[in-house]
Image: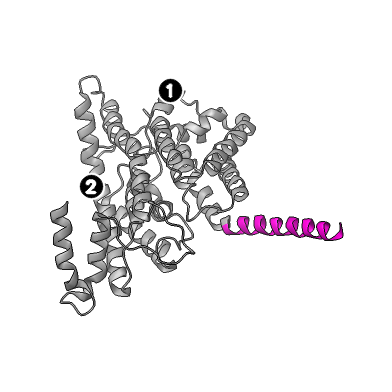
Amino acid sequence: MNFLRNYLDKQKPKFDKGGKFSKLHSVFTGFESFLFVPNRTTDSGAHIRDAVDLKRTMIIVVLALIPALLFGIYNVGYQHFNAIGELEQSSFWQLFFYGLWKVLPMIVVSYVVGLGIEFAVAQVKGHEINEGFLVSGLLIPMIMPVEAPLWMIALSTAFAVIIGKEIFGGTGMNIWNPALLARAFFFFSYPSMISGDKVWIASDTADAISQATPLAQMALGQEVTYSMADMFWGFIPGSIGETSTFCILIGAVILLLTNVASWRTMLSVFVGGFVMGWAFEGISGVSAIEQLLMGGFAFGAVFMATDPVTSAQTNTGKYVYGLLIGAMAVIIRCINPGYPEGMMLSILLMNTFAPLIDWFVVQNNIKHRLKRAKAVVKS
C-alpha cells in the first residue's frame, strides 16, 4: 500500500490547480479518498473529531448487506432449480453460481450507471466525489426482481441518482431514499416487470417460471403455503436481498453494534408492523409474525427506514417515524390487494414527513422548556 500511496502523491500535483489534469481534480480525489482515508482534518474547535467518516460508515453498511446478498444469490439458484424440479440433483455451488450469474450483472449495471452519473456531476460542478452511492448501488439490485431487464435497472438507477440525489445537492441533501426511489420508478414505469408470479424466479428460457410469493398468496386471499421457518431462513421467492430475515438480522446486529443505525427507528418499525398485523389478522388471514417475515418488511426496517439522511433526527421523532412506517406498511398490504407490498410506499411517504415530525418534536420541547423557565421565575 505504501507503493500506491507514494505513486498517488507523485501524481497529485498534476491534478491540482494549475496542473496538467486540473480539470479532473474531482475524479482523482474521488479515487484517492476511496483507496485511503483523507489526511485532511478540521482546525476549528466547533467540530467533533473521531475515526468515523462517510467512507467508513458506508463500508460498514455494505458489510452488513453482504449476508443478505450472498443468501439472495444462493436463493436465486435454489428457487430456479426447485421450480424446474432439479433441486435434489443440484449441488450447493451449482445453485450459488447460477444465482451469481443472474445477480452480478445487475450489481455491475447499478454501480456503473450510478457512479458514472455522480462522477460526471462532480466533474461538471467541480465538487468532490463522496462515497454515498457505495450503499445505494448495492441496495438497488437487492430490491429488484431477478428477471428485471438490465436496461430498466439502469434507467431506474439514473432516475434515482439524478432526481433523488443530485437535484437536491448530492449525498446528505436528499429527501427520499435513493434505492427506494429507484424501485418506485421501476414499479410505476414498468409494473408488469415487478408484479405477478413470473418475475421472481430466474429462467433461462423464453417462458418464465411462475411461482407465487407469500405476499401474493395473502393478497389473493389464498392460504400461505410457505412455513414460518422458510420465511425466516429465506427459502421463498422474492426480491434478491429481501427473503432471508435471518441474514437481515445479522446485518442489523452489525449496524447496531457500530452505531451506524438507530435502534429506536428499527425497533419502532417492527413494533408498528406487529401491532397493526395483529389488528388486521382477521382481514389478512396471516399472523402478525408472518407479516414481519414476508416480503421486504425486515429489509426495509433494517436498511431503509434507518437511513440517517432521510429518517427523523430527534430521538422522539424516530419512535414516531418508525411506528408509522411499520403500521402503514401492513395497512397498505391488507387493504390494497393490487399492491401487496407496502413497505416501499410507507418508507417513501414517511421520508417526506420526517422533517415535519422533527419540527413538532422540537416545538414541543421548546414549549416545555418555556413552561419550566416561567415556573422557575415565578418561584
Q: Residue furthest bottom?
A: 18
Q: Residues within 10 Å of mark 2 (few under 14, many from 20)?
A: few
What's drawn in magenta, residue-wise?
355-379
Does the segment drawn in magenta span residue 67?
Answer: no
Q: Is residue 192 left or right of residue 376?
A: left
Tell me the crowding category of disc 1: few under 14, some 14 to 19, or many 20 or more residues within 10 angstroms, Cα based. few
Q: In terms of image quadrants, where is residue 195?
A: top left
| Prevailing secondary structure of the magenta residues | helix
Q: Position of residue 359 (x, y in %)?
A: 63, 59
| Numbered disc 2: secondary structure | helix
Disc 1 marks a residue whose amino acid type is Ala
- Between residue 215 and residue 239, name the one nearer to us: 239
Q: CB under 8 Å between callouts 2 and 1?
A: no
- Residue 3 image offset from top left, x and y in percent: 13, 55
Which mark sits nearer the N-terminus, 2 or 1? 2
**Label 2 sits on residue:** 105
Residue corresponding to mark 1: 229
Q: Eyeballing the image, is 97 above or below 135?
A: above
Q: Is residue 344 left or right of residue 378?
A: left
Q: Amino acid at mark 2?
A: Pro
Q: Residue 105's x, y, as percent?
A: 23, 47
Residue 329 visible in the shown view: yes
Q: Position of residue 51 (x, y in %)?
A: 38, 51
